[in-house]
Amino acid sequence: MKVFVTGVGGQLGHDVVNEFAKRGIEAVGSDIAANYSGIDDGSAVTKAQYVSLDITDENAVGAAIESVKPDVIVHCAAWTAVDAAEDAEEKVFLINEKGTKNIAEAAKKIDAKMIYISTDYVFNGLGTQPWTADCKDYEPLNVYGKSKLGGELAVSGTLEKYFIVRIAWVFGLNGKNFIKTMLNVAKTHDTVRVVNDQVGTPTYTLDLARLLADMAQSDKYGYYHATNEGGYISWYDFTKEIYRQAGLDTKVVPVTTEEYGISKAARPFNSRLDKSKLAENGFTPLPDWRDALERYLKEIGQ
């Protein structure tokens, strides 16, 4: 088996390439930079074959995929800056929708499987009921969510051999994330205000990468939700546990989204994802998020 992984300069792509390497499976990494631009940690991704690729260039995508001839494409590349997306709608759709369509078309030509990473932002984030994997009640709140839904529809409308995997609250070694931000804030603040009315579950890229590798080696196609287990929490709850495990005494004050201040892009209050379809189809659910946090803090030397 050979795998083509986009977005290896980001959090998830980095771990996906490494996971396949652990399994003895060749993974070719790609990103828009001329050379691999992620963290130089000496892991397999830093030594893997790398292809510089602009996914918005249809001809370049087709040529790259045809040259590598992967059995599976794991599409991690995306515009993920949610607030900045509000002022760059055309570019965001070009990357998240058109770029994904280009990947899907290339996969179809060589009959490759495709795994597309999506988000809970395709829903409206209202209510308290967890969103099921096969729910089609799409109502994105912002440009980012609309563009990721466009990517989903491009994949499902082009391919039959696909996995659409929605995740939330992502953290990993390579790049910025909420945990790193909160740890940095604690260095200069005795007290932090964190929203308590947005609820979901975190996703550790190291754990998610294992699941994606399992999916790549299966034919249980379709829509899935994949975050760490351990129950639904707020960002406030998450921050409290981050500081507890890190041994920090920074005070965390719960506030509403309205009290915190409105961001440029609307955020979902309900990011609860129902992950039951994973076990139903024979996949191992991700570990408890508290366990994932503990392992992650060790990984970053905290």
Image (tube, rainbow, N blue to C red):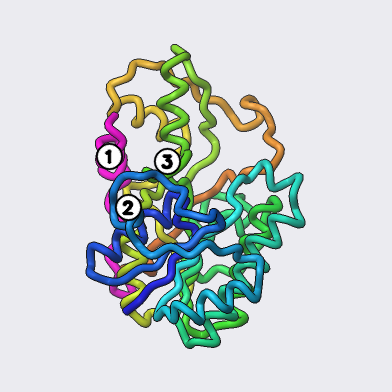
Q: Is residue 150 visible?
A: no
Judge from the rendering whether residue 224 lies leftward or rightward of residue 287; answer left or right: right
- Tag 2: residue type? Leu
* Residue wearing tag 2: 206
Magenta-colored stretch includes residue 297: yes
Q: Nearer the viewer, residue 108 or 272?
A: 108
* Within-10-Å neighbours for mark 1: few <14, some 14–19, many 20+: few
Q: Quadrant of residue 151?
A: bottom right
Residue 233: assigned label: 3
Furthest toward the front, the residue is 34
Is residue 203 shown above or below 115? Answer: above
- Tag 1: residue type? Glu
* Residue wearing tag 1: 299
Which callout, 1 or 3, points to the residue nearer the camera?
1
Which callout, 3 or 2, points to the residue nearer the camera?
2
Cα separation between marks 2 and 1: 10 Å
